[in-house]
Amino acid sequence: MIIDILKFIILGLIQGITEPIPVSSSGHLLIFQKLISGSNLDVDFGLLATLTNFGSLIAIAILFRKDIINLFKSFFGYLKTKKQEYYDNYKYCWLIVIGTIPAGIMGIIVTKLGLFDALEKNVKFVGITLLITALFLFLIRKLKGKKSPNQITYKDALVVGLFQTVALLPGISRSGATIVGGMTRKFKRETAFNFSFILYIPISLATTVLGISDLVNSNLSVNMWICYLTATAIAGIFTYFATIWFRNIVKNGKLIYFVIYCLIVGSLVLIFL
């Protein structure tokens, strides 16, 4: 039992650290799954992804709680009073909606048609997408946009949303794709970071809701539930601190660290796995 918990702690660590940074949490879980293939670790990775994603969602919601509360207040405040003081945040809410729509529609299509079923277990493809991530991060590493949150247009939000659809490919980081999208639209670094993570919340919430059926239909023992919930808690804790760390990396323009990391890990995956 203790050994199983330790293994699930490792899985929670992987999810928690890699979820907010541009290296793909799903890709890293697949790499780890490949590394432990043949071991006696009994893991439902679909269920694990749902639960640890929920842990990460809670962490992001806590970090951005003031922004979320202000957005809700402003949205309904503007609807009720039409006061100009609420307008910027009211508009920002609609920007999030527009940014969410492309990935939402594409996610339904991908799921219904099983477009990426052949790729979801292909660790070599993860190696390729890590190299692609490295390339795009390298191209935008020095960009310094000027757009603040109240200067984001609906077209900007749609473009970032289209970038987010690319993250449906196994191994492509959602945060990496949306930050790259924001930077190509001349967002300030902090603006791109904040928009990316606020945009994460509805997508992650939808993923959690869609995964409820897996939770209901799971036939886990009490001991295994303890293991999964431990991984969820660990994922939440480490997502919280990794997001704070990543925010500083983005603000200081040090994305080159992730370029190097993705190049190394992607190459190692292609060579050895």
Image (cartoon, grey):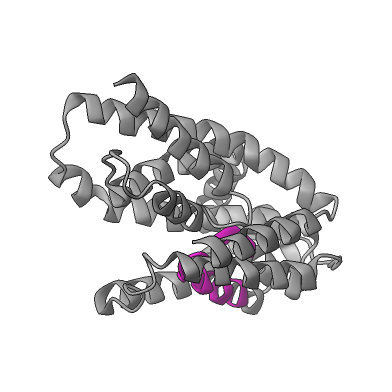
- Decide if residue 71 is in sight here: yes
What residue do we see at 17% from left, 35% from top? Answer: 220
x and y percent of residue 94 in the render? 54, 65
Q: Is 122 or 207 nearer to us in this picture?
A: 122
Q: Is residue 161 magenta?
A: yes
What residue do we see at 21% from left, 49% from top? Answer: 214
x and y percent of residue 206 in the render? 36, 56
x and y percent of residue 273 in the render? 49, 61
In the figure, is residue 164 to the left or right of 207? right
State whether residue 122 is above or below residue 11. Answer: below
State whether residue 50 is above or below residue 241. Answer: below
What residue do we see at 13% from left, 39% from top? Answer: 219
x and y percent of residue 65 in the render? 57, 38
> Could you say which quadrant of the image residue 113 lies in?
bottom left
Q: Which residues are magenta?
A: 158-176
State whether residue 238 is above or below residue 25. Answer: above
> Could you say which quadrant of the image residue 81 lies in?
bottom right
